[in-house]
Image (cartoon, grey):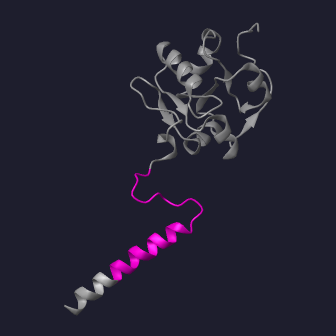
Amino acid sequence: MDTLIRTVLLGATGVLLGIAGNGFTPHPAPLGKPVFAAAELPGTCSDSPGAAARISVEEAKPLCVSCTAAFVDARTPAEYAAGHITSAVHLAPGEPVAPVLGALREKSAVIVYDRDGNCAAADQVAAELQKQGLRDVRVLTGAWPEWLARGGPGESGACTLCAPVSR
C-alpha cells in the first residue's frame, strides 16, 4: 500500500510540475485544446483532395543543396527577381509551362512555393505541373518567408529559362 501511495504522489507531482512549467515557456501549449503542426493551422497550406503533397523547409533544403529537386517560384516576376531559392525557375499562375517543362522533367521532384502561408499561387502552379505529367510535385509549407527565416540558399536576378512576360 505504501508503494501505491508513493506512486500516486509522484505522478501527481509530475503532472503539477509539467503544467506549471508549461506556463513559463515562451509558447505554452494550450491546455485542453488539440495541438497541431504549423502546416495544419488555419491560414496555411491545406491538403485538400487532389492538392500537391507538402514539404517542409527542413526537408526541402537538402534537396536544393544537392540539386536533386527543381524549385518553382510562383510569385510575381518582380518578387522573383528581388530574391528566390537558388536555381529556381519562375512560373506564376496562368503563365505558359512549356518554356520550363524540360528543365523540370530532369529532376526527381519539383517543389513549388509562393509568398504566403495560404499557398494559393503555389497550389495553382503545382496543379498545372501535375496536369503536364510531372509526378512528384510538392508545395513548400511556409513559403518564401519561411525559407529565408530558416537560412535556405537564395539568389536574385531574372529567370533565364522563363518565357518573356509582358506586364
On the rendered structure, is 157 left or right of 32? right
The location of residue 157, given as percent across then percent down, is 80, 25
On the rendered structure, is 70 left or right of 136? right
The furthest residue to the top: 166
Q: Which residues are magenta?
A: 10-35
The furthest residue to the front: 32
In this rendering, the answer to whether 132 lies above or below 81 is above
**In terms of depth relative to the viewer, which is nearer, 133 or 8?**
8
Q: Is residue 159 visible?
A: no
Quadrant (top left/top right/bottom left/bottom right) for the C terminus: top right
Residue at 74 percent across and 9 percent down: it is 165
Residue 82's quadrant in the figure? top right
The location of residue 90, given as percent across then percent down, is 68, 20
In this rendering, the answer to whether 11 lies above or below 110 is below
Residue 125's quadrant in the figure? top right
The furthest residue to the bottom: 2
> Any magenta on residue 158?
no
Quadrant (top left/top right/bottom left/bottom right) for the N terminus: bottom left
The location of residue 47, given as percent across then percent down, is 43, 31
> Any magenta on residue 31?
yes
